[in-house]
């Protein structure tokens, strides 16, 4: 019991540190609580991930740190500023009306920074499944007015399957968005010059992208952190399955040892249908009749 309380307080303390760090980076990026009507508010993700943290394993908390430090905070503090005026920074050497917009739409069918934000949301929300399952357990105990689970947040029974399902969803979303980035933008390269011949351009025009090197660096950071999160999800999946198998093996081994060490009931020798002798202990020569 003391170990469970210690782990609980450690998880809560860890969540508080992450939320404090996230607030610090928001302030350092010039964000205010009464601002951001035109920007995405990441407070709901902070609350979701910090709440789910107390139900996570050690590897799950490392994944949470990577998501906070190298993805959400990088996005909040820097990435949005780099892509802030991406269409204004896209310049073509033509004055043909509509040509520049057509070339921009051809080169960037979906904004890279918005696709990145969608990826962060999609890979974070499967963790809600675990929190909702624990909330369901708490609701059941409150409705029945008695303790139904030894530990509501322990990974056993249905919660084990829910946690595995959340890991599979997170990994699938990570792989899917990485493939989307690769095929939509022809890899993670951001060229300085793009040649475009889309209608209504009169001929092949040269278009220039603003801050190409800086954008390329952030895309590489996004790709590397996505791969790291995929590796962490696979490691956690293997760790949980191995822990589950080891727990089942240990339980069966202990039960077998208990059956082996427990004294067996001595047999009762039968002389005839009506007369029975007293039971005697087993010896090397057999029961004494």
Image: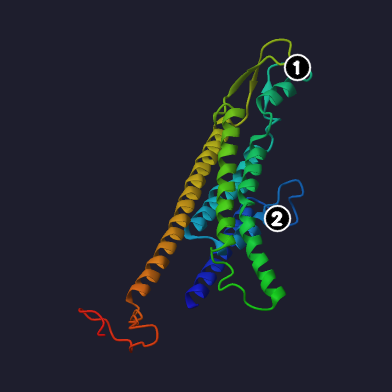
Q: What element carries label 2?
A: loop
Neighbours of disc 1 within 10 Å: few (<14), some (14-19), many (20+): few
**Residue 130, image quadrant:** bottom right
Please, is residue 96 above or below residue 84 in the view? above
> Is residue 51 left or right of 246 when viewed as pictured?
right
Q: If you read the primary sequence from the N terminus, does the residue marked by circle 1 or circle 2 appear first? A: 2
Q: Which residue lies furthest to the front in this view?
A: 273
User: Disc 1 designates what residue?
Assistant: 95
Location of residue 277 in the rendering, given as x and y in whole percent from the top left corner: 33, 88
Location of residue 193 in the rendering, given as x and y in whole percent from the top left corner: 59, 21
Which sits in the foreground, 96 or 255? 255
Neighbours of disc 2 within 10 Å: few (<14), some (14-19), many (20+): few
Please, is residue 159 above or below residue 97 in the view? below
Please, is residue 111 above or below residue 131 in the view? above
Please, is residue 263 above or below residue 103 in the view? below
User: Disc 2 designates what residue?
Assistant: 32
The total number of labels drawn is 2
The residues bearing labels 1 and 2 have C-alpha atoms spaced at a distance of: 40 Å
**Residue 25, image quadrant:** bottom right
> Is residue 154 left or right of 252 when viewed as pictured?
right
Instruction: Give the quadrant of the C terminus.
Output: bottom left
Q: What numbered label is drawn on residue 237?
A: none
Location of residue 33 in the rendering, given as x and y in whole percent from the top left corner: 72, 57
Q: Which residue lies furthest to the top in this view?
A: 203
Colour theme? rainbow
Which sits in the foreground, 238 or 19? 238
Location of residue 213 in the rendering, given as x and y in whole percent from the top left corner: 54, 31
Residue pictured at 47% horizontal, 46% vertical? 231
Q: Which residue lies furthest to the right in this view?
A: 97
Residue pictured at 61% horizontal, 45% vertical? 75
């Amino acid at each position: 019991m003391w170990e469970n309380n210690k782990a609980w307080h450690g998880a809560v303390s860890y969540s508080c540190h992450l939320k404090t760090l996230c607030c610090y980076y928001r302030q350092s990026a010039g964000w205010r609580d009464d601002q951001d009507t035109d920007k995405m508010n990441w407070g709901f993700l902070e609350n979701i991930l910090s709440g789910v943290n107390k139900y996570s394993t050690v590897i799950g908390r490392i994944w949470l740190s990577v998501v906070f430090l190298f993805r959400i905070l990088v996005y909040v503090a820097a990435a949005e500023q780099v892509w802030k005026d991406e269409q204004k920074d896209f310049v073509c050497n033509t004055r043909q009306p509509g040509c520049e917009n057509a070339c921009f739409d051809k080169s960037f069918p979906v904004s890279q920074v918005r696709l990145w934000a969608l990826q962060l949301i999609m890979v974070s929300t499967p963790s809600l499944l675990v929190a909702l399952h624990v909330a369901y357990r708490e609701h059941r105990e409150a409705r029945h007015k008695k303790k139904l689970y030894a530990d509501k947040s322990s990974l056993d029974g249905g919660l084990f399957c829910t946690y595995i399902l959340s890991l599979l969803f997170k990994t699938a979303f990570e792989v899917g968005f990485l493939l989307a980035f690769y095929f939509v933008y022809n890899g993670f390269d951001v060229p300085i010059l793009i040649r475009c011949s889309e209608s209504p351009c009169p001929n092949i025009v040269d278009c220039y992208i603003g801050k190409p090197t800086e954008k390329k660096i952030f895309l590489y950071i996004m790709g590397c952190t996505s791969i790291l999160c995929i590796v962490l999800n696979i490691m956690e999946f293997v760790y949980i399955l191995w822990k589950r198998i080891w727990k089942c093996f240990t339980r069966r081994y202990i039960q077998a040892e208990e059956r082996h060490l427990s004294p067996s009931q001595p047999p009762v020798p039968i002389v005839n249908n009506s007369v029975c002798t007293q039971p005697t202990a087993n010896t090397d020569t057999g029961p004494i009749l």
